[in-house]
Image (cartoon, rainbow, N blue to C red):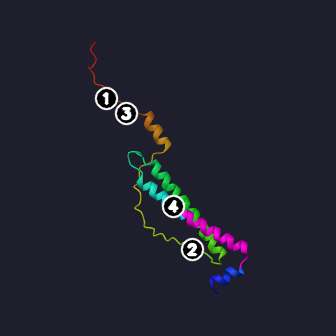
Amino acid sequence: MTDQTINESRPHSLTRGVGSLEDNLEQVSKAIIECFEVARIIPRDMDEYGHIRQAEIGNAVRLLRASAKIGRTLALIQGSKFDHNISVTRQITPSPAPKRRRVQTITQQIQDNTNPPHPQISEGSNNE
């Protein structure tokens, strides 16, 4: 089945919608390129902290997300199916055992604070 046969079997409004989405995808692609060009040509002395550059890159990322949605919609209309399966495998390495600290109970702390060591008093240190 050729593209022409597929287009002839579709309603006119559907082919017009697909054409509109394809035009939008092209416009978004041009806008993404423009965002990256603007981010690249901004002089460093005008954007000391990089806020303007970051804003342009953020715009490009948002446009990329929008273009992905448009592309997915076009593919779904044209009968394609997307399945994304992502599997993550972690290799867990045993960490060394933490060093044990001496833990005092509350009663031990109270006893240590109430019974401070007595300083040595020498006789004869007072001049009377």
Task: Look at label 2 and name its amino acid.
Answer: Asn
Which amino acid type is marked by label 3? Pro
Q: CA distance from mark 4 to mark 3?
A: 75 Å
**Residue at 46% across / 55% down in the picture?**
38
State which tag comes first along the sequence, 2 or 4: 4
Answer whether residue 13 is magenta in the image. Answer: yes
Do callouts 1 and 3 mark residues in contact (Cβ within 8 Å)?
no
Q: Can residue 67 be found in the magenta stretch?
A: no
How crowded pointer 2 is (Cα within 10 Å; few <14, some 14-19, many 20+) is rated as few
- Between 9 and 54, the one nearer to me in the picture: 9
**Element marked by disc 2:** loop
Task: Name the mark on residue 32.
Answer: 4
Q: Which residue is mark 2?
A: 85
Q: Which residue is mark 1?
A: 120
Query: Looking at the rendered structure, which numbered label has been put on residue 47?
Result: none
- Say whether residue 10 is left or right of residue 29: right
User: Rounded to the nearest whole Å, what is the CA distance between mark 1 and mark 4?
Assistant: 81 Å
Name the kind of residue labelled 4 in the image: Ile
Q: In the rendered view of the protein, which quadrant contains the N terminus?
A: bottom right
**Callout in the foreground (2, 3):** 2
Span of residues in magenta: 10-28
Query: Do labels 1 and 4 touch, CB within 8 Å?
Result: no
- Name the mark nearer the viewer: 2 or 1: 2
Badge 2 or badge 1: first in the primary sequence: 2
Q: Name the residue carrying label 3.
A: 117
Residue at horizontal 42%, vertical 63%? 95
